[in-house]
Image (cartoon, rainbow, N blue to C red):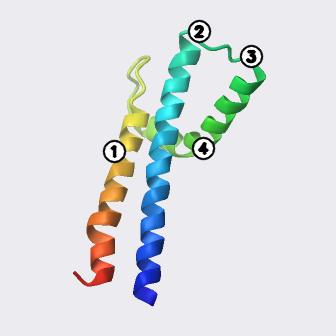
Amino acid sequence: MAENLAVVLLSFLGYIVGLYQWVIIAGVIFSWLIAFNVINPHNNFVSAMWQGLNALTEPLLRPIRRALPDMGGLDISPVILLLACLLVQNLIYGVAIPAVRGA
């Protein structure tokens, strides 16, 4: 019973990390659309979406940005965060779940 619960919780955590990857991608695309004036950031809906995406991504992107050297206008922190999310997912599905199952 405890084994099944652990597998379910680890699978759920992997699913949440996968959803977070899509939030990161949406934030990057949204920032490009705002930067190139494709969407109006003064629109209430756009502003609310932008604030929501920033609230979800900035707490993890900010420390990465501080650790990276200045690269002019190039921000690769979302790429590093996506790679970290992929690493966590691979650890969950490739190491943690098989270890719990005893494989």
Q: Mark 1 to mark 4: distance in Å?
A: 17 Å
Mark 2 or 3 closer to N-term?
A: 2
Q: Amino acid at mark 1?
A: Leu
| Residue at which label 3 appears | 42
Mark 4 or 3 closer to N-term?
A: 3
Q: Mark 2 to mark 4: distance in Å?
A: 23 Å
The residue drawn where x is 36% and y is 57% is 88
Which sits in the foreground, 58 or 20? Answer: 20
Circles 2 and 3 in contact, beta carbons < 8 Å: no
Q: Quadrant of residue 99?
A: bottom left
For the C terminus, the quadrant is: bottom left
How dense is the environment of label 4, judged by Cα within 10 Å: few (below 14), some, or many (20 and up)?
Answer: some
- Residue 25 at x, y = what percent? 46, 34
* The disc label shown at residue 56, or none: 4
Which sits in the foreground, 54 or 29? Answer: 29
The residue drawn where x is 49% and y is 25% is 29
Q: Amino acid at mark 4?
A: Leu
Q: Amino acid at mark 3?
A: His
Which sits in the foreground, 76 or 48? Answer: 48
| Residue at which label 1 appears | 83
Residue at the right extreme of this rendering: 44
Q: Is residue 40 left or right of residue 90?
A: right
How dense is the environment of label 3, judged by Cα within 10 Å: few (below 14), some, or many (20 and up)?
Answer: few
Q: Secondary structure at mark 4?
A: helix
The residue drawn where x is 36% and y is 49% is 84
- Residue 41 at x, y = what percent? 68, 18
How dense is the environment of label 1, judged by Cα within 10 Å: few (below 14), some, or many (20 and up)?
Answer: few
Mark 1 or 3 closer to N-term?
A: 3
For the N terminus, the quadrant is: bottom left
Q: Mark 1 to mark 3: distance in Å?
A: 32 Å
| Residue at which label 2 appears | 37
